[in-house]
Image (cartoon, rainbow, N blue to C red):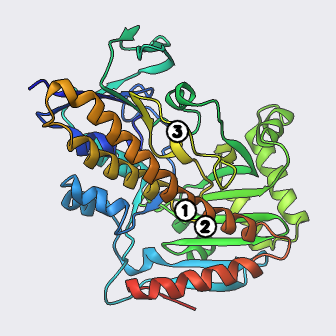
Amino acid sequence: MQPLNVAIIGGGPAGLTLANLLVSKAIDVTVFERDDSPTSRATKGGTLDLHADTGLAAIEAAGLRAAFDTYARNDFSSSVMIIADRRGEPAVRITGNQETGNSRPEIDRGDLRTLLVDALPAHTIRWGSHVSSISPDGTIHFNGSHSTEPTTGKYDLIVGAEGAWSKVRAHITDTRPVFSGIGGFELHITHPDSEHPDISKTVGNGLYCASGGGRGLIGQRLSTGAIMVYAFSRSDDAQEPQELITKCDNDLEKVQKEVKRRYEEAGYSPEMCEWISSANPTTIRGWPLYDYNLPDGHVFTHKPGFTVIGDAAHVMTPFAGEGVNAAMIDALELAKLIKGVTDVDMERRAEALDKAVEEYEAEMFVRARSVMEETMENKIAMFEDDAPKALKGRMEIFAARNSELGQEGY
C-alpha cells in the first residue's frame, strides 16, 4: 500500500516531535524548516520543563526517553522556583523532592532540538526552506536564496508547526494572534558563576521571578551555566521593544542602560537591577508576547488537508510553562490518529484521514483552552501593581497540587 505523505512546516519542538512519532514505512514525512542548518540560529531560547502526561509522554512514545535523559537535568536543584517581590524578598519557594529529584526534568530548548533532529533519518528535514505561501490546491511555495526548491507537490496532509505567524494557519483561517499587553527584552548573563557570583547564588539552578509595579524580572539557569534574563512589562504597544532599540540607534548598551533605568524607577532593588547591567549587551533582543483572545480565539473551522499544532494552533505567553508541553501533546495525539488510518484502503483513506484530523482539532481546542486560561491568569497576576501578592496565591495552589507529584512548596 502506498504510504501516507505528510509535510510538516516548522522544525521546532512541535514539528520535530510529530516527525519522530510518524516516520515509518507507512508514512513518508518531510519537515520544511527555514533555518539554514541545525546550528544556524544564534539564540536558541531558554530552558523547558517537560511534564509526565504531556511533553515526557511524547518523548517516551517516540522511544527517546534514554536519549532525553542524557541532556535533561533531573536533579533536585533544577526544579527550584522562587517568586519574589521587586526588592528580591521571596514570597513563594517551590522545590523538588530531594529523594525523588525533579518530576518535571529541565532541558535547554537547543538540546531538545538536537535530540529530536538527531533521531530522524537524515533526509527528513529540508533546511533553508522558508515557506512564502500555500496555494489553494495545497502546493507549498518557498522564497529566499536558501530555498531547497521553488515549489513542492501535494501532500495527503500539511501540518503547520511554524509558530504564531504560521503560513499554514493563515491558509486555514483569517484569525491572527493578538498582542498580549506584555513585552520586553531577553538578555544573557554569560558567566555568572565566575563574574557575578551573587546573582548566580540568588538564581540558583532553577528559576527566580521578581515582579511588581507592572513589571517582571525572571532569571533562568541554562545547562551551560549561563543565566537567561527576561525583563517584561505591561505595554499598550507591541512595537515598544523595537522602538526603544531604534531610539537608541541600535546601540544595545544604550538599550541596556535604559531598561535598567526603567526598573530602578519602578522600585526594583539595586541587586535586582544588577541582573540587567550584568548581561552581555550583544545578547539583548526585543520580545513582544502574543496570544489569542479567550475563550475561542484559537478555534477555527476545519479545512481538509491541513491542520496546525503548537504555537501555530494556540500561541500563549510563557507564564505557566505549558507552551512546549501543549505543543508536544498536540503532536502525540495527532500522530496517534494519523497512524490509525494507515491500514485503510486507498479508496477510503483520504476521508478517514480527514475525519481523524478533525477529531484531533476538536480535542485540541478544548485541551488548549484549559492551558491558555491558566496562562492568562498567571499573566494577569504577575503584572499587577501589587504583585507578587496575587501570583503568590496562585503559586501556593500550584505547589499544593504538585505535592502529589513529589514536589514541595512553601
Disc 1 to disc 3, C-alpha distance: 17 Å
| Label disc, if present, on residue 374 of the rendered structure | 2
Tell me which numbered mark, 2 or 3, is placed earlier along the sequence: 3
- Nearer the viewer's eye, disc 1 or disc 3? 1
How many marks are shown on the rendered structure? 3
Residue 45: percent from left, percent from top: 51, 49
Residue on which disc 1 sits: 371
Which picture quadrant has residue 355? top left
Q: Quadrant of the N terminus?
A: top left
Percent x, y of residue 247: 86, 35
Q: Is the Cβ of the residue at disc 2 closer than 8 Å to that at disc 3?
A: no
Instruction: Report which residue position mark 3 lands on.
Output: 163
Q: Residues within 10 Å of mark 2 (few under 14, many from 20)?
A: some
* Residue at 32 percent of width and 46 percent of height: 17
Which residue corresponds to the image point at 82% horizontal and 36% vertical from the top-left?
A: 243
Picture layout, residue 251 above or below residue 386:
above
From the top left corner, tell me how far across and down residue 384 is, in percent. Answer: 81, 70
Task: Report if the CB atoms under discs 1 and 2 are less than 8 Å apart.
Answer: yes
Nearer to me, 145 or 64: 64
Which amino acid type is marked by label 1?
Answer: Val
